[in-house]
Image: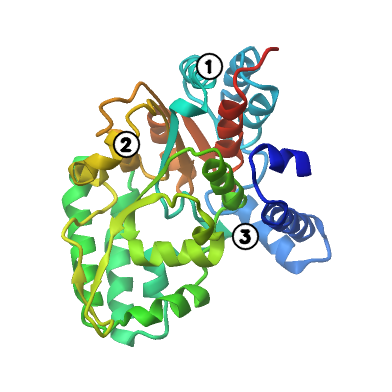
Amino acid sequence: MHSFLASYGIPLAAGLTAVLGGLSYQLYRWYLVRSQKNERSRDLLARARSAPGELPLVRPIYMGGEEQFRSVVRASNLTKELKAVLCRDGVYIGNPEKVVQKLEKMLADGADRFQVVTDFDATLTRYHRDGVRCSSSYGILDSNSMFPSWFREETDRLRKKYYPIELDPALTVEEKTPLMKDWWTKAHDALKQTNLNQSWLPKMVQESSVEMRDRTGVLFAILDHCNIPLLIYSAGIGDLIKEVLIQRCSFKNFTEPPLIVANYMKFSDKGALIGFSEELIHTFNKHEIFPHHLDYFAKHKNRTNVLLMGDMTGDLRMADGMSHRETLVTIGFLNSKVHESFALYRDSFDIVLIDDQTQDVPIAIVEAIIKGASSD
């Protein structure tokens, strides 16, 4: 363990904290699901079997065609560790020949030509904990008792109206875009009437149910210590995202903090909320924000290989503005409406992770790129 962490220059204490945290959860999960004496376990399993679309999904997950793509992965020149992770339950690759070719190129090019671009909510953070939905960055606001009841009622009304539209696989991005703009605008207008103060943010995050996906801290540590750029694109609130990362993921320990592009609040000298940043970012317009951050892309123009991660098809355009990009591998976290949305995700993302609340696959890809191509 010490030699593994040392190979990335990760401090032993920080690495052990991240690893032990993951192991503790796995032991908890094993007890919860396996113990026949645990009523909560039996309830979860019974509900999952009677309603297979609800979370957590019953394992193993079978969507059809797994053995075909796994045979291509096993026959590739990828590292043994990466092959094993890509062939595990809940991972699906729709076009394995194409994906393997891109990954092999990334391994051959090495870490100096590599960078990561990711969404935040439901990508870096957990979607659920044992079937109970975890908060998003906006959800931290929606459920907080510090706000008046009318605000929670209004945000609940907006969510019930627009959230099904956001997830509807039958609607195109072009159809969803103006409706998402309406949702974000109305939510921001409501928030400006709550007398929110900047000093409330730490307590709000502390009391929320937001959680990072398992081993997110390990992923961040590897990227940071190997000087691999990390760009976080989010339609959430940047001020809350930074506070989440500080409290849940040791954000202050970054040698070079990642660029976080999101909706930022504007506060008065006394800390009162007075508005938002001019560039409104919602689920499906992240690609429109590139002109505001040209200096970042110029700085990393030699990083021509990109790992992109998101949970919505709109996230696929987060790397559109990288004119220097050569190879792009996309990971889609399919968190809900699994059976209804699977075909769309399979055909849109290179790698689909079905109800996966970890960063195991991204970590395996990053580690393989750092170590280089396998000699097997």
Alpha carbon of mark 1 to alpha carbon of mark 2: how far? 22 Å
Position of residue 39 relative to residue 253, above or below, is: below
- x and y percentages locating residue 50 in the rendered image: 61, 53
Alpha carbon of mark 3 to alpha carbon of mark 1: how far? 39 Å
- x and y percentages locating residue 186 in the rendered image: 19, 68
Q: Which mark is residue 185?
A: none
Check if mark 3's residue and mark 2's residue have beta carbons within 8 Å. no
Position of residue 72 relative to residue 170, above or below, is: above
297 horizontally vs 371: left or right: left
- Which residue corresponds to the image point at 25% horizontal and 27% vertical from the top-left? 323
Instruction: Point out the tag, 1 or 2, that comes first from the N-terminus.
Output: 1
362 horizontally vs 264: left or right: right
- The kind of residue on which mark 3 rests is Asp
- The kind of residue on which mark 2 rests is Lys
In this view, the residue in front, 316 or 117, is 117
129 horizontally vs 106: left or right: right
* Res. 7 image quadrant: top right
Instruction: Point out the tag, 3 or 2, that comes first from the N-terminus.
Output: 3
Q: Which residue position is annotated with label 3? A: 130
Q: Quadrant of the C terminus?
A: top right
Instruction: Point out the tag, 3 or 1, that comes first from the N-terminus.
Output: 1
- x and y percentages locating residue 175 in the rendered image: 19, 44
Q: Which residue position is annotated with label 2? A: 299
The residue tagged with tag 1: helix, strand or loop?
A: helix
- Which residue corresponds to the image point at 29% horizontal and 71% vertical from the top-left? 157
Q: Which residue position is annotated with label 1? A: 108
Which of labels 3 and 1 is toward the front?
A: 1
In this view, the residue in front, 7 or 248, is 7
